[in-house]
Image (spheres, helix red, strand yellow):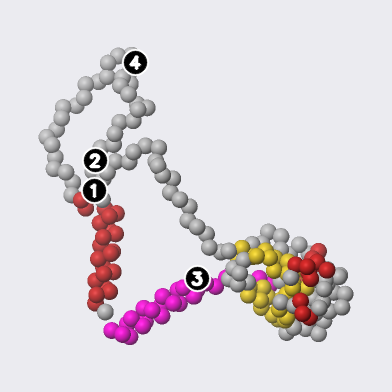
Amino acid sequence: MASSRQVLLLAAVACLTSLAFGTQWMVGDGGGWRAKFNETGWTDGKTFVVGDSLQFVYPKEKHTVIMVGKDAFAACDLSANLQLGNWTSGNDVVQLDKPGKVWFICNKPSHCDNGMKLVIDVVDGTVAPSPLPFPFPFPLPFPGTAPAPSPLFRWPLFPWGSAPAPAPASPAAAPPSAAVRNPVGSAVAAAAAAVVAAALAF
């Protein structure tokens, strides 16, 4: 029993982990992290979400990837004490773990001044569900009941004469069962019962 619970737990963790993976963006696409990067328009049309990552590919002997603040980015300040992150491997992956703007530069002499810099705006990936459009513009009948007549359609509908006589009433039939009136509710109840039964079996 314990092993079965462990298997279910591992499966649930695997599903959640797969959902947690974001998009890995290769900075600059085929051109990589390069000089005058701010002129490429690489970020145009892209949405960066918490959980995504940036992959910087470049010749490691020529460039670096430095995360800085807004002011250091604008001034191309290469001071080591202003660095928020430093990558130099030539194939670096930077995780985007919180919303907000993130600034990167290359701190090789004159590279930032020549446009080797990047700023992105990271957004929160969680989206609140849209509220249901209540109240409805008309009342909804309960399952198994007849809808109320609409005020848009009133007798007579035949301005040229009287309305046709209604058909004779048929003998009253027994009301349909709850299962017929609400098949969706029955399916949900059956599924819930199956889940409860499976949980009790462990």
Sequence order check, earlier mark of 2 and 1: 2
Residue 47 in view, yes or no = yes
Which label lies toward us, 2 or 4? 2
Q: Do the numbered discs 2 and 4 sit on residues whose CB atoms are within 8 Å?
A: no
Say which of 101 and 59 sits in front.
101
Tell me the number on the disc at residue 145.
2
* Residue matched to label 3: 19
Residue at x-position 81% and y-position 85%: 61
Residue at label 4?
159
Identity of the amino acid at label 4?
Pro
The residue at 71%/77% (across/down) is: 84
Tell me which numbered mark, 1 or 4, is placed earlier along the sequence: 4
In the visual, does 13 lie left or right of 113?
left
Q: CA distance from mark 2 to mark 1?
A: 9 Å
Whether pointer 3 and pointer 1 mark residues with C-beta atoms closer than 8 Å, the reply is: no
Pair 3/4: label in front: 3
Q: Would you call the spot at circle 3 few (<14 residues within 10 Å), some (14-19), or many (20 or more)?
A: few
Which residue is rendered at x = 44% and y = 45% of the image? 133
Residue 181 is labelled as 1
Q: Residue at x 26, y 79 (%)?
A: 202
Residue 24 is inside the magenta segment: yes
* Residues in magenta, as a range: 1-26
**Which of the numbered marks, if any, corresponds to residue 149?**
none
For mark 3, give the secondary structure: helix
Task: Give the SS element for disc 4.
Answer: loop
Q: CA distance from mark 2 to mark 4?
A: 30 Å
- Give the alpha-carbon distance from disc 3 to disc 1, as whole Å: 37 Å
